[in-house]
């Protein structure tokens, strides 16, 4: 199967007064049609920035795309004009964000906002779009969608608003949905509902989902493939099973170990000592060096090359780990 | 979708905009409604002034100066025996026109300028705001005098001059609003939906900064009316025998002790108009906030 989105050696840096912040440093991965790709990493690992930067949703300057390709159906998004890219955003590629409470314009009716992409990208008439909007709200499980359309955002709870955001992202039947921590701001029960909705809609529409999160539980429940990122680098990628069961990278392992488990008695939750390094003062080698349990001298000077474990399962680490 | 035909939509529900909703809420606000009625009434009366007024505004009767209110002269007469009722009507024409037009100029220029400056940001914003600073530094009277000298004395020039100085603060207010809104998630979301920048400014940023704009607007109208009075007093605005409320009030002050009516009537007219404007402005601000009571 041909990938729907292919990111190749993508690099995006922020040029700030303190120096160059290498927010995304040479990352490559791909996402196939209809699958869910999970991107995990700590805060500041570049998982959101990488998406926002190739969609040009970040101010530039300070952001500067340094190199690489981002191929959407074989066309390089980085080479598109602003207008061409605008035709893709919200149309073929939609996004949902972390903060449902503030993601809707408080001065606009839910319906009016919901149908905006349809009016822009599909040229629907107001009335057609309104009808489609009602169906879309129904699909994300909002009761009495006809009424909901003419309400204002403040009349909805966080979970409802996130549903509206999902509905808005889905009105144009996108081929790729980028979900940037869609459930982080919601409580656990609502979180489960939202994930269920995403799963069901994906089953119906066969769209690909790129799920950005730091919650391994969410990834485990939804993702087919997983990319582990740290300090702007990809550390490991593979199928969900590869990462959860046969991880070959000390960072992925540490991340897994620091997730609370329901089936084991733990008196203390292991943490990864230290913090993510300052991205403007990265050492030449592996950025995880300071915190790594398996570090070697070579790690300090040269970032490890790609190492294939199984077909599709790759890590970037010198250490030989037990299987 | 197969079942789309089965969905019934209420006629008035489709795309009811913020403005329609706001109008509905405004109608429910009693004070705002009275304010609006009063202003509407004034507009009609002022427009019909030549028909309604019992005398000419410049007709003097030196045998009947500073008369108290009476049947032939409802508001009495001024120090030259001119009918005060007539002069208040004609003065209202000028004052309201100056107030409303100059404020409109300031709102349109200020909002567009401020929104663009704040939205683009960076160097453009810096340059645009320095221009505002420079204009701020120019003494207003100086500007008016220059305009008057170059283009002659003209009532429209007065509108332009007043509008041109009033938009500066408006631009700053809107710019500040837009900058604080620009990084809100819903603006980012709008970008991610592929909505064009013009549309983001018009549909998202400006409606969200409308509250302070309206409040400031209700402050602008009276200050413009007073500035016009000040200019007229200096001989740069409306010239006698034409009158504005500002000139009438300043005339009234000079004879306040002998004939208080000459001050009283124009002052009350001005006060009532400003009250109405403020009520309307207040009501508008509340009406435009969707979080306001909705029933």
Image (cartoon, grey):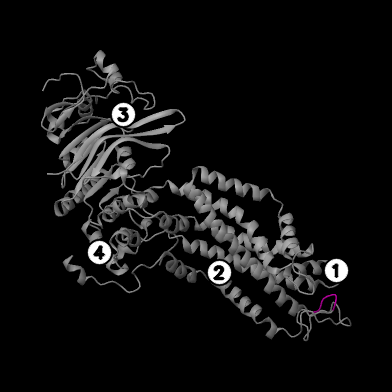
Residue under label 4, please give it.
A132
Q: Nearer the viewer, mark 4 or mark 2?
A: 4
Q: Are marks 1 and 2 in contact (CB under 8 Å)?
A: no
Distance in Å between CA atoms under marks 3 and 4: 42 Å
Q: Nearer the viewer, residue A182 or A50?
A: A50
Residue B155 image offset from top left, x and y in percent? 70, 69
Q: Chain of mark 1?
A: B
Q: Could you say whether the residue bearing mark 2 is in a helix, strand or loop? A: helix
Q: Quadrant of the C terminus of chain A?
A: top left
Q: Are discs 3 and 4 located on one and the same chain?
A: yes
Q: Residue B219: x and y, percent?
A: 62, 59
Residue tagged 2? B31
What separation in Å lies between label 3 and label 2 (alpha carbons)?
Answer: 59 Å
Q: Which residues are magenta?
A: B76-80
Q: Are marks 1 and 3 in contact (CB under 8 Å)?
A: no
Residue B233 position by quadrant: bottom right
At numbered mark 3, what does the secondary structure look like: helix, strand or loop? loop
Residue located at (57% from left, 47% from top):
B129
Q: How much space separates mark 1 and mark 2, taking CA atoms? A: 35 Å
Q: Which residue is mark 3?
A: A231
Please say if A89 is above or below A111.
above
Disc 1 secondary structure class: loop
Q: Are marks 3 and 2 in contact (CB under 8 Å)?
A: no
Q: Nearer the viewer, mark 1 or mark 4?
A: 4
Chain under disc 3: A
Residue at numbered disc 1: B257
């Amino acid at each position: 199967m041909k990938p729907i989105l292919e990111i190749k050696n993508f690099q995006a840096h922020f040029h700030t007064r303190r120096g160059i912040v290498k927010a995304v440093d040479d990352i490559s991965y791909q996402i196939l049609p209809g699958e869910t790709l999970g991107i995990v990493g700590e805060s500041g690992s570049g998982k959101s920035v990488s998406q926002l930067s190739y969609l040009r949703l970040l101010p530039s300057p300070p952001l500067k795309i340094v190199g690489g390709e981002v191929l959407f159906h074989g066309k390089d998004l980085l080479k598109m004009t602003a207008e061409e890219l605008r035709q893709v955003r919200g149309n073929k590629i939609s996004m949902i964000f972390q903060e449902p409470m503030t993601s809707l314009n408080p001065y606009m009716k839910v319906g009016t906002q919901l149908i905006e992409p349809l009016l822009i990208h599909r040229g629907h008439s107001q009335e057609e779009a309104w009808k489609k909007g009602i169906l879309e709200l129904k699909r994300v499980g909002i009761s009495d969608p006809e009424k909901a359309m003419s309400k204002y955002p403040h009349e909805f709870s966080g979970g409802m608003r996130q549903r509206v955001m999902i509905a808005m992202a889905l009105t144009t039947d996108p081929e790729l949905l980028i979900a940037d921590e869609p459930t982080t701001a919601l409580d656990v029960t609502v979180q489960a509902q939202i994930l269920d909705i995403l799963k069901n809609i994906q089953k119906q529409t066969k769209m690909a989902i790129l799920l950005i999160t730091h919650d391994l539980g969410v990834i485990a429940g939804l993702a087919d493939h997983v990319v582990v990122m740290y300090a702007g680098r990809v550390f490991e990628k593979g199928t969900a099973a590869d990462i959860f069961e046969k991880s070959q990278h000390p960072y992925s392992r540490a991340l897994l170990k620091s997730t609370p488990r329901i089936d084991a008695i733990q008196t203390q939750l292991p943490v990864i000592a230290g913090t993510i390094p300052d991205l403007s003062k990265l050492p030449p080698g592996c950025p995880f060096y300071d915190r790594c349990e398996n570090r070697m001298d070579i790690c300090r000077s040269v970032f490890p090359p790609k190492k294939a474990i199984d077909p599709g399962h790759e890590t970037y680490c010198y250490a030989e780990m037990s299987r | 979708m197969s079942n789309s035909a089965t969905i019934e939509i209420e006629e008035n529900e489709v795309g009811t905009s913020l403005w329609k909703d706001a109008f509905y809420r405004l109608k429910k606000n009693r004070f705002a409604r009275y304010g609006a009625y009063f202003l509407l009434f004034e507009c009609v009366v002022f427009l019909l002034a030549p028909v309604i007024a019992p005398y000419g505004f410049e007709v003097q009767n030196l045998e009947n100066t500073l008369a108290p209110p009476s049947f032939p002269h409802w508001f009495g007469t001024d120090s030259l025996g001119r009918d005060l009722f007539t002069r208040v009507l004609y003065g209202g024409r000028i004052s309201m026109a100056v107030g409303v037009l100059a404020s409109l100029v300031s709102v349109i220029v200020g909002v567009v300028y401020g929104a663009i400056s704040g939205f683009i940001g960076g160097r453009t914003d810096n340059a645009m705001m320095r221009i505002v600073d420079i204009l701020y530094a120019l003494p207003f009277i100086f500007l008016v005098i220059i305009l008057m000298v170059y283009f002659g004395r003209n009532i429209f020039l007065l509108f332009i001059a007043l509008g041109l100085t009033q938009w500066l603060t408006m631009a700053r207010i809107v710019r500040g609003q837009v900058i604080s809104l620009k990084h809100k998630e819903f603006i980012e979301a709008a970008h991610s939906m592929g909505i064009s920048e013009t549309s983001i400014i018009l549909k998202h940023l400006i409606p969200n900064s409308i509250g302070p704009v309206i409040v400031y607007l209700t402050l602008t109208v009276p200050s413009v009316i007073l500035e016009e009075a000040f200019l007229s007093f200096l001989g740069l605005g409306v010239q006698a025998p034409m009158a504005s409320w500002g000139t009438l009030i300043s005339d009234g002050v000079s004879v306040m002790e002998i004939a208080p009516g000459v001050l009283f009537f124009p002052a009350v007219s001005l006060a009532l108009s400003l009250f109405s404007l403020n009520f309307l402005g207040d009501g508008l601000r509340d009406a435009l906030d969707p979080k306001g009571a909705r029933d």
